[in-house]
Structure formats: C-alpha cells, structure tokens
Amino acid sequence: MSTTDPRPGTHDDVVPVVRLTGIVKSFFGVDVLHGVDMDVRPGEVHALVGENGAGKSTLMKVLAGVHQADAGTVEVGGEEVTFDHPLQAQAAGVTTVFQEFNLLPERTVAENVYLGREPRRRRLVDPRQMRRDTAALLDDLGIDPDALSPDRRVASLSVAQQQVVEIVKAMSFDARIICMDEPTAALAGAEVDLLYSLVRTLQERGVAILYVSHRLVEIFDLSDRITVLKDGHLVQTVDTADTTPDELVSAMVGRSLGTYFPERTDGGPTDDVVLELSGAGNHDIDDVDLAVRAGEIVGVAGLQGSGRTELAQALFGVRPFLRGTMRVGGTELTPTSAREAVAAGLALVTEDRKAEGLALEQTVTSNARLVLDAVMPKTSNRRSRDIPGILSSLDFRASSGDPEVRFLSGGNQQKVVLAKWLVTEPAVLVLDEPTRGIDVGAKRAVYDLMRDRCAAGNGVLFISSELPELLGMADRIVVMRDGRLVGEVTADVGEEGVMALAAGTAGEVAA
Amino acid sequence: MSSLRERSGAAAGLLNRLTSGTATIFALLVVVLVVITILNPTFARPASLMAFLRAAAPLVVLAIGQYLVIVSGEFDLSVGALVGAQVVFAAKMIDGDPSRTWPVLAAMLVLGAVVGLVNGLITTLLKVPSFITTLGMLLVLFGAVRLWTGGAPTGALADNFRTWGRGGIDMPVLRQLPWALVIAVVIAIAVGLLMRAPWGRTLVATGDNDTAASFAGVRVWRVRTVAFVLSGVLATVAAILIGGFAGVTAQVGDGLEFVAITAVVLGGVVLGGGRGSMIAAIAGALAYQAIERLFTQLALPSTARPTLQGIIIIAAVAWAAREGSRGPGAANTPAPDASADPAPA
C-alpha cells in the first residue's frame, strides 16, 4: 500500500521521527515493558493499542521523558537521545497531550501556551507578542479566532477547546510528534470531528501523531499504522489498511469481535415494570416518559449535554425531579437524595469514575462497602462478606492484598464501583457511561454483568455515547435531545438512525 | 506471575499496611524516649513514666478529637479556646463546692457538644470553610471568657474535680495509675472501635472524596457535623484533665489547637482528609509531649517552645509531602500503568 498512498511518511525509506528499540522498563521489580520496538514516521498517525496494563502509557511516558527506560534506545530524527525530563523531550519536538490537561484555568489561552517561556521585551513579559504568536499558531491550525481567542480564560472553554489549547501548546514547541493519550475520552460527538480535522491538519504539516485510544472506530478512521502491545510485549505493527477490527481485537486480547457483546441467556424482558417515569422533569430535563422492565436493558442515547446524565442524577435524587411521577417497583417516590434512591433499590454508576465514584485513597474493600456502610450500617458487616465473590465474578484482579483503588487500572476501578453497587442488591441499575476509558476485557466484564443482572430480574438503564455498545446490548434505545426523549428505536435502525434522532436531523421529519 | 512473587507481594503488602504512615512516628517516639532516658535514667522508672503519660493524656485526647475532624477533611481551630473557656466556666460554677462537681461536669460536656454542633452545622450547611468557622469560634470563646471574667478567672475547682487530672488508682510497681491515662485509653479504644465501624469508614471516605461519598448515599453534612461534636466533647474531656492537672488560669488553653494539629500531623495524618490512622495521631501526641519533655531535660527556655512547635509542624508536613510524592505505597503496587492486572483481563 505504500506505493499507492499519496500521503507523506508512509514510505519505508523515510527517516522516522522517533524510533524506539528494545525498550525495557520495570517498576519496583515488576516488568512493564519487555523490549518493545516501534517507529513513527513523519506525518503519520500511528495508533498504539492494547488493554489497560499492556504498557501503552508507560511506553508513551518513556518517549515523553517522564520515565527513563531501563534498557533500549530512543532515537529522535535518527539521533539517539536520553530524556531525563519532559522539558528536554519537548525541546526536541516530542510533545504529549495527556488525558488530564496541564492548564491553568484562571489564565488566558496565550498565557497557558507560553507558560514559563513568555516572550520578553526589556526583561518584562510582552503580552502583545504572546497574543500574536498564539493567534498565529491557532490560525495555522485553521482554528476560528472568534471561537477560540487567545484572550479567553481557559476555565471558560469547553473540554474540546482546552484540548485544542494543549495541541497549540505542543505546536508552539515546533513539535515533530504529538503523543495523544485517549484524546476523545472526554469529547462528545461533534467535538470528535473537530479533533479529527485537527489531526489531519497536523498530519499535512508533517507532524507525526502517536494516538493512544481504546476506540476502534477512531483508530480505523485516523491511523496509518497500528502497533499492538500486550502485557508489555510488542505483538505487531501493521498497516491499518491491511487489518480489520476483528483481527485487531484478537491481537489485543486473543478473542474476536464476534463474541464482543454477549448474547442474552434468559428469555428476555418480563412484563414487570421496575422503573417508571411519567411526565418527569426538573430544571434540566422535561416531560420524560420511560418504563424499564425486569430483565430489560434500556439504552439512552444522545449527544453530550442532551440531558442523559441529568436524567440519571434526577433518578438518583442528586438533582431531583420537580414534576411528574416516578415509580420504583410500583411504589411511587421522588428521591431527593442518593440515600433515598439507594433505599428504594436504585444503583448509579456515575459517568466520572474518579470524581464521583471512588474514594481513591481508600482500599478496594472500603470502597466496595461504602454504600453498605452509609445506607445500611446494621447489615453492612454481614453483607460485605459477599464482596470478594462479587469482585471475582467481575473478573477483578488485584496484585495482592487490598490495595488502594488509586493504584488500579481504569477497568479494575470500574469493577470496584460495580461491586459497590451490586452488594446492595439493587432492583434497578443506572449505568452512566460504564465503559468509558476502560479496556476491552473490562468492557466485556461490564457487558456480562448487564446480562447477568437482567437474568436475575433487574432492570438496567444504560447511558452511553458509544453507539455500537448501545446497539449491541440494549433491548431498545431511547434518544434524548435538549432534555427530552425524542424517540425510541431498536438496534435495527443502526448507528445512523440513532445519530439522526440525537442530532435532530431526522427528528422533525419523523415527528 | 509466579506464586512465590505473589506471596512475597502479599507479605510486603501486609507489612506495608501495618506500618504505613505509622512506622516513622513510632520510630521518632522511641528515639526521643531513649534519648531522654540516656540523659536522665530515672525517666525509665515506672512512676516517672506514669507521670509522663498523665501529662500527655490531655493532648492525646485532644489529638483524637482533632484527628476525627482532620480525617474528614476539615479543621477545628476552636479546641484551645474551648479548653480555656471550659476551665474558667468550671471554676466559676463550682466555686470550690464539691457537691456541684457532677452537675458542672455534665454541663461542660453539653457545652462542648453544642460548640462542636455549631461548628459543624455552620461548616456543612452554611458552607463556611471550617478554617474560618472554627477560627471565628476561637475568637468568640476567647472574647466571651475575657468578657465574663474581666480578665482574671474567679472561683476554684473542687478536689473531686481535680482528681481526674492529677489523681489515680494506687497500685504496686506503678505506684499510681493516673485517671487521666485510664480516661485517654478508654477514649482511644472507643474511638478506635468507632473508626472500624461503618461510621468511621464513611468518615474517612468523606474526607477522601465527599462527592463520591455523597453519591454513595453518605449524609456528608451529618458525618462531618458528628466529627465536630466529638471534637468538642473530647476537648471538654481534655479541659477537665487540664483543669485538674494545671489549675485555673484564663490562658490555660491558649495555643492548644496548634499543639493538637501538630500532634496529628506529626502522626502522618494528611491535612485535607482521607488518610491517616488514629493510632498514628496518638503516637504523634506522645511524640510531641516527649519532645517537650526532652527540651525540659535539656533546660531549653520555655520561650523557645512556639519556635520548636513551628519547626516541627513544617518539618512533619514536608516529610509527609516527600513520602507522598514517592508515590505508590512502595511494595504494594508497581506503577500506575503496570496496573493491577498481571494477566490479561
């Protein structure tokens, strides 16, 4: 394919921007990388994939100068380098946009881009020069200056815009390669398109992109080559055109995409309604009519800001319903606190695992029994005995003992959150983006759990931005837009059908 | 991963958990006690050890109270002023009459609980940062005592009041087991059990991440308010011991809030909440008392004490920060991305 591809950087004879050879890295005697080789060519989008714990982030951090390899060499532009500090890597044109941004919220875009190396004039910071340089960089990337002015405070920007600021910052170092760690994890649909176009612009400028992501769709949309890591070993580097999602998943986990979404094992939804809303609304959402039956998975689709998370929070009493009625298992109630919702048999796996789901410095057990301790202290000791069984049923693996959850991978953290709720034996599970930022294996565990709960007669409300999993798992899908339910579909409408409703392009026609 | 490595990992994890954050403070405590004993061998006698523990008991009780508030993510700066107010209140109300001791003790405990309740409710419901709430309470109590007494406290404590702070149970070897020590131990056991109960775990989780706690059904405001109430009650107990031991002056509680916070921080309890054990806080209190004792032994002027206290608190927090930045609790876990799944999930 290298002979037919018009893009630069896909020819084998080009000097790579970065070449990693035999990288070995271990922490506290545990080997994380076992001699990994990888090269990235100019203007190439190179995807780096693997399950959590495969060593992707560590490899990226070795390249970025955050970690130092125990063995192996790093070459940049054909010359061997040793980065002791990320600043050295940046100076050499190796920049990184981490999942958590390093921006000062109260400073302007320009101040953030040039933080610590502000242009000077007579030894004082020259704000006008700084603004001009930032505007030039934005312009170079084709960013509309009205949408993102160098004078905007970062706190006033959307997550997507903040990401653009990080990329602009990277470009201000004359980046030859930008490493992006899960760049779309926090973005909504339309924002992902912006990132796509930005990546392509960078590519045209000859900048290489090392793209770490769990989302196969993006990888196939964007990348030229894919490197697969598994347990710290290099599995393969392939041209994207020569592989398929199925092959890629097999390479990552040794299991094919065909079995990705587990089939249901029970007879399907019963007639018992476990959760019912009629005419429910508050400040954020309105006029929601919804019923979830025992054994049923109801998917909730919608763009970011369409009211999906607000619906979950209203159900859970965090931002309570002010209108309409809500019934759980036939009993009418309107929870005004999480505590009431829990007592009524609801469980909520929140969208933001670290901020809302876990006490990161507490152990797995403390986290897993927190709801019991808080809401049902009298039976907490007895019921918490179920926790080890629940964790192992979720295929939870911890190194030893009872570690603090901050040391776990995203997938394992999510399993702790799930265990925390399962041990309360809820009747209705509300899952808000339960697979966000977790690896393929952990996703599968979440899907299996959903099927299990259905078989056990629970109802599941499954909120997700990832249409394939909604279509693959939900019995039916309700679509939200502007705080309202705008339609209900089944999997046969496909991703386009759901998107059309969510974006409002087909909604009016259908209505 | 080999089972051998797994087992050694488990052993290291257990060791790590047993000593996490507490090893340093216990080592410091032992070192200081040994140095005192070398300088003054009579210190190791049971009787003088008992005297040391009696003197340390009020600080231990204060530190336990402060620990509860700090681990929940808050501060209680009002405890010193509360101790002062309570002692003055007791002297004035008892006025040397032993028959009034018991009712006054009850009234003091209620007063302490009310002060804690007000601190807690203002902090949690009015969302005033506890630093400000309790600083304000400190000034209110300080001013109220001055206003009420006109600067010089009046009245006197009866002997049956003072015995809690300076009396004890006569026995062989130890000569006397101080009531103050008995009370401190009973409180330590009670609070220790409380911390292992559901309430204690929700308290620490709240200090770690109150948003997550609230999503898990924790009534964050109530948990924290109870911590403040307990802090007020324990400060009152400390006041009873201090009043008996040291007698009545208007300055008796001055600066005790900082001593208590120093002790807790010395024990490795993290300001901001969610991390640290009560045992370590108690060890911190004992270590602080031992360091003071050492300086007495070295005949350092008492005017140097505040300077010493300042240096200790800064050094302790700097040490804790250094430990924290070393990251993952050593053997327990390798590194963020080495993660916990040795095998593919």
Image (cartoon, coloured by chain):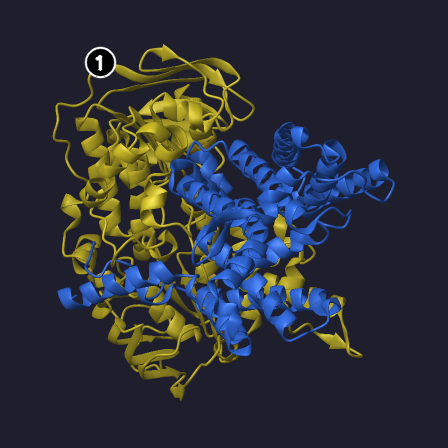
Chain colours: A yellow, B blue
For the point 61% across and 64% down, which residue is it? B313
Would you name the residue on which mark 1 appears? Answer: A271
Q: Amino acid at mark 1?
A: Asp
For the point 38% across and 86% down, which residue is it? A78
Residue sitting nearer the eye, A501 or A180: A180
A175 with respect to A328 (left or right): right
Say which quarter of the image contains residue A398. bottom left
Vertical placement of A443 versus A475: above or below? below
Residue sitting nearer the eye, A286 or A346: A346
| Quadrant in the picture for the C terminus of chain A | top left
Q: Residue A165 at x, y = what percent?
A: 57, 59
Determine the secondary structure under disc 1. Answer: loop
Specify the subunit that label 1 lies on: A
Estimate how packed mark 1 is, as few (under 14), some (14 to 19) or many (20 or more) residues with alpha carbons within 10 Å. Answer: few
Q: Residue A185 at x, y = what percent?
A: 41, 50
Vertical placement of B302 versus A431: above or below? below
For the point 32% across and 81% down, which residue is it? A70
Task: Please say whether residue A144 is visible from this viewpoint.
Answer: no
Q: Residue A504 at x, y = what percent?
A: 45, 30
Residue sitting nearer the eye, B19 or A299: B19
A404 with respect to A386 (left or right): right
Q: Residue A68 at x, y = what percent?
A: 39, 78
Say which quarter of the image contains residue B326. bottom left
